Image (cartoon, helix red, strand yellow):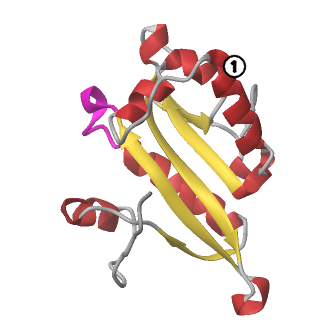
Amino acid sequence: MTSTSPEPAAGPAEADGAVLIRRLEIADRERGFLPLLAQLSSCPDLTASEFAACFADLAALGDDHVILVAEDPAAAPERRILSTGCLFVERKFLRGGGKVGHVEDVVVDAAARGRGLGLRVVRRLVEIAKEAGCYKVILDCTPDLRAYYAKCGFVEKGVQMAVYF
């Protein structure tokens, strides 16, 4: 993550039409990042200082935690972030100290769905994982999203289990 410009592992920001795919910036709090995440799951509003602290914690993980956003610079300031997704890189002893990429928190604003933004974000996250040396990328999704993630190149494998607190 970065506060002003893309980090090297994410490569340059990618523009297609009016929408830019780039790393999360601290200013994205004011561009609708948290309300977008709230469309996916519980995401209470954070004060500017709480957001900055969380941003700093995640940025300290470097290229092992990448959050991408799709931004429409022409949109109203509080609605510029249209999509987001996260890549967490897990380091393992398996496969000679291999790495596994985990794609998480993928969401597209309800008003922007159908434009391929989520697909672009997910594909870029997969590229970043490959560039980081991950031997695989995994994600969990609901059964109704299987076909969507198949379009992103994922195949169904195994069963997800969880313990929530």
Which residue is located at x 46 percent, y 21 percent? Answer: 32
The quadrant of the picture occupied by the C terminus is: bottom left
In the rendered image of this protein, does residue 20 appear above or below residue 129? Answer: above
- Report the span colored magenta: 109-116
Residue 99, given in percent of the width and then of the height, sits at: 69, 75
Left or right: 24 as drawn, with respect to 32: right
- At mark 1, the secondary structure is helix
Residue 48: which quarter of the image? top right
Residue 74, given in percent of the width and then of the height, sits at: 46, 12
Q: Pointer 1: residues within 10 angstroms few (<14), some, or many (20+)?
A: few
Queried whether the magenta region covers residue 46, the answer comes back as no
Q: What residue is pinned by disc 1?
A: 49
- Nearest the camera: 48 or 163? 163
Left or right: 161 as drawn, with respect to 96: left
In the rendered image of this protein, does residue 57 appear above or below residue 99? Answer: above
Name which residue type carries label 1. Answer: Ser
Residue 50, given in percent of the width and then of the height, sits at: 65, 25
Which residue is located at x 55 percent, y 65 percent? Answer: 102
